[in-house]
Amino acid sequence: MRKSTVCIIHEAIGSHNAIAKITMDSVRQALKAGFNVTVVAKFLDESLKGQVEWLPLFVPPRLFLFQWLSARPAILAALGKRKFDVIHVNQPQVASIADVMQCHFLTRVAYERHCLETRHGIRPAIVRIQQQGVLHAEDFFYRHLNPKTRMVFCSEMLQNDFHKLYGRPNNEAVLSYSFPPINFPTENERNDARVATLGGVHKDIIVGYLGGIDERKGYRRLIKALEGENNIFLLIGGIYTDDFVAPTLKGRFKAVGLVSDTATFYAACDVFIVPSIFDPLPLAVFEAVSRGVPVIVSENVGTLPHLLKYNAGVCWKENEPLVPLIYKVISQKAVFNAGARRMAEELSEEVYGRNLLKIYEEVLNEKHNYNGKDRTL
């Protein structure tokens, strides 16, 4: 009796970014269920080496448009003539060969909401050209989707956007990311985090943001909302923030660049804000909530229904003042932390695993008329 085989594909499987973390969760759940697991990836977390068959993926070192366009031939080359019971991909370039395509983002929606690169200068212009190329390439792959591919969306918001743009897939499901284990910091740990991140213990309210200098992430709206607030300090991290300056927040602002130790970053914050123009399911929301930080998100964030359901955060509506919301969530921190504990129970890694394996089993049934006698998980 042979074990079922699954091939999981994404350029990075580890802690590199949100999708890499979710892909690593999928690999671990497949291993736990007894699958023989093969991965196609450029980067693989050390903890998984030796547990899976690793087919190295070549990714060009620069120009993300070139990386995007070269992904399909590179993945197919890595796969060769191998066959698997389930092929689970996280990149639309190979959705046509997938049994399960996990959809995390739609460039077309970002474009239609006018939140692709808009800054002036040579580097932003190069980014803008590449974004346009990815936009049209992504459109092509989603409009030529394999009708047998099961589309898995990270949020209902993203699912609805996909329907409007490309129609309703024959097979689809919504699968939320897993919520990290609760790890609320003590007051001493919070003070240590502020010293490490800010250079000292501040009396001001510390508002955290990790979206980088990205129009889609809504950083401009956040900065404008905090102008003139002398008791609020903005801690900003993410791509292109190393040398970023916010003149209107002089003395009440610090940019820290890319953040590898997110646990310390969250512990330094009193409130975490995601003001995105479009964000299907930012993992940072779950991570911040798990660290005991009340979260405020815009109406365009796919995690919002979870926050409202469990009372672990609030919505920042368009044209609504932000500062009253900040004081509100700080005053209700105990309530939000109780909601965080409920989220940890109902959206745990184990729950994610059960839902993912249910999808795998459905694929096995459809592809192989699986009856549990000739193949095991």
Image: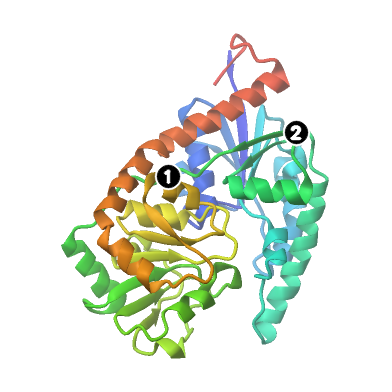
Residue 375 placement: quadrant: top right
Q: Which of labels 2 and 1 is toward the front?
A: 1
Q: Give me the disc on residue 28.
A: none
Above/below status of 357 relative to 372 = below
Q: Quadrant of the N terminus?
A: top right
Q: Which residue is disc 1 drawn over? A: 309
Above/below status of 133 relative to 240 = above
**Badge 1 amino acid:** Lys
Residue 139 rendering spot, x and y as whole percentages = 79, 55
Residue 275 rendering spot, x and y as whole percentages = 50, 67
Q: Nearer the viewer, residue 228 or 188?
A: 228
Residue 44 showing in the rendered view: no
**Badge 2 amino acid:** Asn
Q: Which residue is outermost to the left?
A: 188
Count residues near mark 2 (Cα–Cα under 10 Å), then give few for <14, some for 14-19, many for 20+: few
Q: Which residue is disc 2 drawn over? A: 170
Residue 292 rendering spot, x and y as whole percentages = 29, 55
The structure residue drawn at horizontal position 31% and vertical position 73%, both measured from the top left corner, is 206
Sequence-wise first label, 2 or 1: 2
Q: Nearer the viewer, residue 43 or 204?
A: 204
